Image: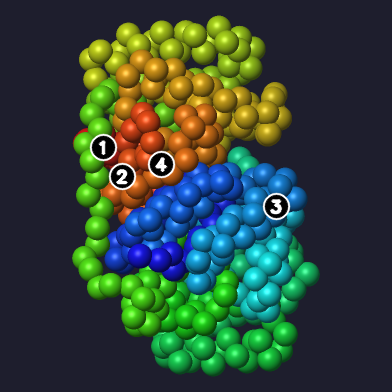
Amino acid sequence: MALLLGCIADDFTGATDLANTLVRNGMRTIQVIGVPDGLEVPAEAEAIVVALKSRTAPVAEAVAQSVASCRWLRQAGARQIYFKYCSTFDSTDQGNIGPVADALRAELGADFATVCPAFPETGRTIYNGHLFVGDVLLSDSSMRNHPLTPMTDANLVRVLGRQTKSAVGLVPYATVRQGTAAIRAAFDKLRHRDIAYAVVDAIEDEDLRCLGAACADLALATGGSGAAIGLPGNFRRAGLLATRPAEGDLPSVGGAVAVLSGSCSTATLAQVTRMRAKHPSLMLDPLTLAERGEAAMADAMAWAIANLKAGPVLIYASAPPEVVKVVQAKLGRERAGAVVEHALATLAQGLVKEGVRRLVIAGGESSGAVVQALGVRALRIGPQIDPGIPATVSLGDPQLALALKSGNFGAEDFFLKAIEKLR
């Protein structure tokens, strides 16, 4: 078995989301954590997704990690590179989507790449270059108040144009709905005009399958997890990938279970409320964590140990926008986020020492901090819990069952379903 597709994701939950998409479309997929220097290529992998914590990192750091991952994937045999970012295009005017995409194009010698964060299954669609979340523009959604990457412009051509010196064009829906050949022809016209990026409209999964087929000969494609659904078919048509049902069986891990939530998204807040009604919960106050430090952590850990005896527990720092703003005003945006990430990562280490083997983590930055703190290097991808969120089991010792959730993903009962799915 040979590696076919190499993927670079800018956060941990996004990487799991993409791996889930590839598994559901018949590719044996392994997710590796961090730049995989020195890591042996898993023999069973037809696709490898490198999970970076680069979405909100300094631009130079994000670029360096992404290029290093690209080189490793190419050396491992990947025939195509896919750069994955959030379906809500989380970024700032400084990056990091544009700078990373520019660096990957340069590394691959590619003059052109696609841009498509659409994920219709979770309500993310693109029309006339504008990203919609459900039936509202991105700029009118809860993402407008995101604490790290507030998205106040739904025009992806314009947003990406502020992050790159290269030209950005559009493949409109009138072209996309004509199918793969029309999309390819649109690519050729844009390349002839020296346009480096094509934002591609997509409303339905079939649009993304046509887009995937149109990307067969591109060295680099970029997008959300949804836009990758058409990529496995290219390898299958080339005789490089077997036709098989979606896989995903995982070994049973057992052990106690805990939910750790750092996300402040609207979806996560609803999930926290539902979980609190069923299981013991503890709220972490960032101001208290900043003031009391290790003493506050010791208190939280003692609470967790006492309550784990009765079943699953929830520890969360999730809070509504008005509360987040107060915290950020006192601590600063970066320190506020760092305090929460450190707390959840430290608690995860303590929980694992106490016998917890099943963890549900909400929030991309929180998931990244936890997985890194636990020393997890790779994940085997299992069955889907909710769209974009699979169950996973870590490779290595101790074996951990993990569900890593992007902030805006999952139904209100996601935490409860994840507890049941992580065996």
Badge nearest the viewer, 3 or 2: 3
Q: Which amino acid type is shown beneath numbered disc 3? A: Ala
Q: Which residue is mark 4?
A: 404
Q: Gap in Å between the C-alphas at discs 4 and 3? A: 25 Å
Q: Which amino acid type is shown beneath numbered disc 4? A: Leu
Q: Quadrant of the C terminus?
A: top left
Among numbered discs 2 and 4, the one appearing first in the sequence: 2
**Secondary-structure class at tag 3:** helix
Which residue is drawn at the image coordinates 70% and 52% (left, top)?
A: 64
Bin the neighbour count of mark 3 within 10 Å (Cα to Cα): few under 14, some 14-19, many 20 and up. Answer: some
Looking at the image, do the residues carrying marks 2 and 1 touch, with CB atoms under 8 Å apart? Answer: yes
Bin the neighbour count of mark 1 within 10 Å (Cα to Cα): few under 14, some 14-19, many 20 and up. Answer: many
Among numbered discs 3 and 2, the one appearing first in the sequence: 3
Q: Is residue 387 visible?
A: yes
Q: Which amino acid type is shown beneath numbered disc 1? A: Leu
Position of 368 relative to 410 (above/below): above
Among numbered discs 4 and 1, the one appearing first in the sequence: 4
Looking at the image, do the residues carrying marks 4 and 3 touch, with CB atoms under 8 Å apart? Answer: no
Looking at the image, do the residues carrying marks 1 and 3 touch, with CB atoms under 8 Å apart? Answer: no
Which residue is drawn at the image coordinates 48% and 49% (left, top)?
A: 40
Among numbered discs 1 and 3, the one appearing first in the sequence: 3
Q: Is residue 238 left or right of residue 38?
A: left
Q: Which residue is mark 2?
A: 391
Q: Which residue is mark 3?
A: 64
Q: Which amino acid type is shown beneath numbered disc 2? A: Ala
Badge nearest the viewer, 1 or 3: 3
Q: Gap in Å between the C-alphas at discs 1 and 3? A: 34 Å
**Secondary-structure class at tag 1:** loop
